[in-house]
Image (cartoon, rainbow, N blue to C red):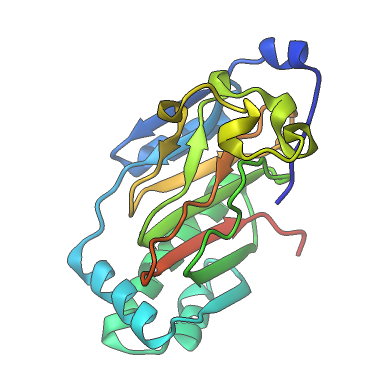
């Protein structure tokens, strides 16, 4: 988890928006300069829900962090998840997202993390020092984020002076907090996207209800 703090006046000169659609063709909109999150709002079919439930019940401690490419992603995921009909659909879907992510950003490989979570991984609002990250939750509560014009970035990290997100003045009211839905595929533009310094999407992990699990996938740029 990384944060960035800059002069408040600098932030006021930057404008960023969210773009949402129910078709995957929305994803290239991340290249728009005034955009720092793009959301493909999709509903998971029953086979993916069943696969995610199966993984959470059989591998509740799953912590997979692997380097993959569009050619090997499916087979690598089958090794991790088990080569069975119930999980093959999930491997196929993740391999498809890997292919889309690599094509969109002209990448040969990506860093893939598939994690079962029983708590918030990054519970404080923050920005990532990455160019862009794909995030999707196959099961459970999904990531929360703040619109750019609702954030006082001087309250990120040490600027919070030890206060909680709700108390620090980072945002004005609880209704400012936006949340992805289960199944949504989001591209989160980070601080290392060229020209986006001081405008990386502010987001956090959600609190996971007691006695439940979340299945989270992230894809990241890699130098390898």
For residue 91, side relative to residue 99 (left or right): left
Does residue 6 sit above or below 206 in this rendering? above
Locate the C terminus by quadrant.
bottom right
Residue 151 percent location from the top left of the image: 60, 24
Q: Foreground residue, 181 or 189?
A: 181
Q: Is residue 25 visible?
A: yes
Using the image, determine if residue 140 lies above or below residue 187. below
The residue lying at 62 percent from left, 46 percent from top is 124
Residue 2 picture location, percent across and down: 74, 46
Whether residue 206 sits left or right of residue 196 in the image: it is left
Q: Nearer the viewer, residue 147 or 161?
A: 161
Quadrant hosting residue 132: top right
Q: How many marks?
A: 0
Please report the residue visible at 47 percent of the width from the left and 43 percent of the height from the top: 144
Give the image location of residue 47, x and y in percent: 22, 71
On screen, 213 above or below 126?
below
Q: Residue at x 68, y 11 (%)?
A: 12
Q: Position of residue 160 (x, y in %)?
A: 72, 34
Residue 196 visible, this orientation: no
> Looking at the image, which residue is at 77% across and 32% down?
159
Which residue is at the far left? 46
């Amino acid at each position: 988890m990384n944060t960035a703090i800059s002069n408040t006046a600098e932030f006021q000169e930057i404008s960023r928006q969210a773009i949402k659609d129910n078709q995957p063709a929305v994803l290239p909109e991340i290249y728009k300069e005034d955009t720092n999150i793009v959301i493909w709002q999709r509903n998971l079919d029953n086979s993916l829900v069943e696969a995610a439930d199966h993984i959470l019940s059989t591998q509740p401690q799953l912590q997979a962090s692997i380097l993959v490419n569009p050619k090997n992603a499916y087979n690598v995921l089958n090794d991790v998840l088990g080569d069975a009909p119930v999980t093959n659909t999930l491997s196929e879907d993740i391999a498809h997202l890997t292919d889309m992510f690599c094509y969109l950003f002209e990448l040969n490989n990506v860093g893939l993390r598939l994690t079962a979570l029983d708590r918030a991984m990054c519970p404080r609002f923050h920005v990532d020092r990455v160019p862009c990250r794909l995030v999707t939750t196959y099961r459970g509560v999904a990531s929360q984020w703040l619109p750019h014009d609702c954030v006082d970035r001087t309250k990120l990290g040490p600027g919070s002076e030890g206060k909680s997100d709700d108390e620090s003045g980072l945002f004005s009211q609880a209704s400012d907090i936006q949340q992805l839905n289960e199944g949504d595929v989001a591209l989160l533009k980070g601080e290392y996207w060229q020209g986006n310094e001081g405008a990386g999407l502010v987001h956090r992990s959600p609190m996971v209800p007691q006695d439940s699990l979340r299945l989270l996938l992230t894809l990241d740029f890699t130098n390898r």
